[in-house]
Amino acid sequence: MIIAEDVGQVSAAPETLAPQVARKLENEIMRRGWPVGQLLGSETELRERFGVSRSVLREAVRLLEHQLVARMRHGPGGGLVVCAPDSSPAIRALVIYLEYVGTSVGDLHHARLLLEPLAARLATESVTEEEIARLRATADPAEPVDADFHVLVGQLSGNTVLRLFTEVGARLSGQYVLTYKDVPSTGAAAPWVHAPARHLGVVDAILAGDDASAQLRMIAHLTEIEDWLLTQSRSWSTERMLTRPVDPQPGRDPARKGAEVLAGRIHDDIVGEGHRVGEVFGSESVLLARYQVGRAMLREAVRILEHHSVAQMRRGHGGGLVVLAPDPTASIHTIGLYLNYQGVRPEHLLVVREALERGCVQAATAAARGPVAAGRLRDLLAREDADEEFHARLAEIAGNTVLTLFLRIVTRLWVSQGFGEESPGAADGGDAHRAILEAVLAGDEGLAQHRMRRHLRTFTTRWH
Ligand SMILES: [Zn+2]
Ligand SMILES: [Zn+2]
């Protein structure tokens, strides 16, 4: 649990006051064990408690409402009420980040191939008849996007982290399918043609308790989707994925929707027009005219973009909406809140981490055949401080944005949920890290995988 002891007054520069108040309220909610429906205090009470102005408190409340952590109930007896968060803000945050940094079809599907067969295997162990009926009911995708079946398999794995990542992968992949579905076909059958039969094949294997077959069928299905996407994208002129952040539950919060949609459009335009970090995308008046919206709506959208570190409004002369470097910190925070509410367990993180690290070793060994990655791996091997953030550095050299992000989330959560330190490196004095690197550089993936797995097992023995 992420727990701060004090819930008293805050002090800092005005622009960081609201996030501080929001954090303190989040901590209080977590410490109380997410008492959904409980009143945390009226607006006046909260203002007095934190010693902040009405506008700062309202900004803090907006941040909490954006993450579905709490909402302000107006009227007599009203106040800030604890909500039951769902996964949609966390998923949206991840999808936005991955779109922003630019994610290739290959990277995305590599991650899906690591995680979804694992989900199918875990589902085989615990599935009930009622769940089988639900799987069969979602086998035929209503639209080409084909995410529901995969989301459900992720859910039936019983692992909240795996479920979240599976949903991100399936939704993002669905966005690619939408992007490429109208590109003149190159002959290969579109994935949604075969999807119902492929899904039912996976369900049959799960039903039979044949986890090996469930995994293989899932792999075959995902490979078909990937192959089609790669063929379609090659016959298209642009490298960039043209998508808009998808709202997994459109219309669940109509009041908020306008600003979310506007934020999505602005984000699309920033990326689509190729604006660089630090550049001014437009002044407030230019944006008001361009998007034909009211000032309140624009400011709400800007708050959302600021929350995701996509852009920031700079005041004063020469100011405007400035493009920021993508930063997943806010997304990881949102995910931490959601998983804390869901009750994430150490074994959830461990099993997902093992799959992700396997992917990183795979990708790093493949990348090591090229001179640039090989040089970076040798530099890492020679470094005095190679053990610090070793896993994050290896993932970065491996070069898969999805695996790098997911691994970062898993290691941060491990620490923030109080399960232990970030790396077990100290246990073997860094020898394990060097040995993994040597095998990767020698092109011996099998040995590198073995060493990584052995190394990760020290997590289990030390904290269980
Ligand atoms: Zn499918
Ligand atoms: Zn390590």
Image (cartoon, grey):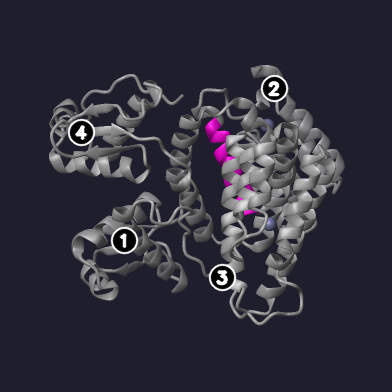
Q: Amino acid at mark 1?
A: Gly
Residue span colored magenta: 400-413
Classed neighbour count for the residue bearing mark 2: other residues with Cα under 10 Å, few (<14), some (14–19), many (≥20): few
Which element is circle 2 on? Answer: helix
Disc 1 marks which residue? 258
Q: Earlier in the sequence, mark 2 or mark 4?
A: 4
Residue 72 is left or right of residue 400, and the answer is left
Please give the name of the residue rendered at 30% of the width and 27% of the height, measured from the top-left corner: 38
Task: Say if the magenta span includes residue 404.
Answer: yes
Task: Measure the C-alpha gap from mark 2 to mark 4.
Answer: 44 Å
Q: Label 2, label 3: how many angstroms apart (C-alpha)?
A: 41 Å
Q: Is the stretch drawn in magenta largely helix, strand or loop? A: helix
Q: Against 230, is 422 above or below?
A: above
Q: Residues within 10 Å of mark 4 (few under 14, many from 20)?
A: many
Residue that carries the numbered disc 4 in the rendered image: 79
Q: Which residue is pictured at 46% across the width and 72% down the height?
A: 272
Which callout, 2 or 3, points at the residue further toward the start of the chain? 3
CA gap between label 4 and label 1 equals 24 Å
| Residue at screen point 47% across, 64% down | 244
Disc 1 to disc 3, C-alpha distance:
26 Å
Is the Cβ of the residue at disc 1 closer than 8 Å to that at disc 2? no
Q: How many marks?
A: 4
Instruction: Quarter of the image for the C terminus: give it.
Output: top right
The amino acid beneath tag 3 is Arg
Look at mark 3 in the image and give the residue it sits on. 240
Find residue 338 and report its horizontal and vertical position in percent: 46, 36
SS class, disc 1: helix
Side (left or right) of 321 relative to 113: left
Residue 51 seen in render = yes
Query: Where is residue 277 shown, x and y percent of the image?
Result: 42, 62
> In whole angstroms, how far apart are the C-alphas of marks 1 and 2?
46 Å
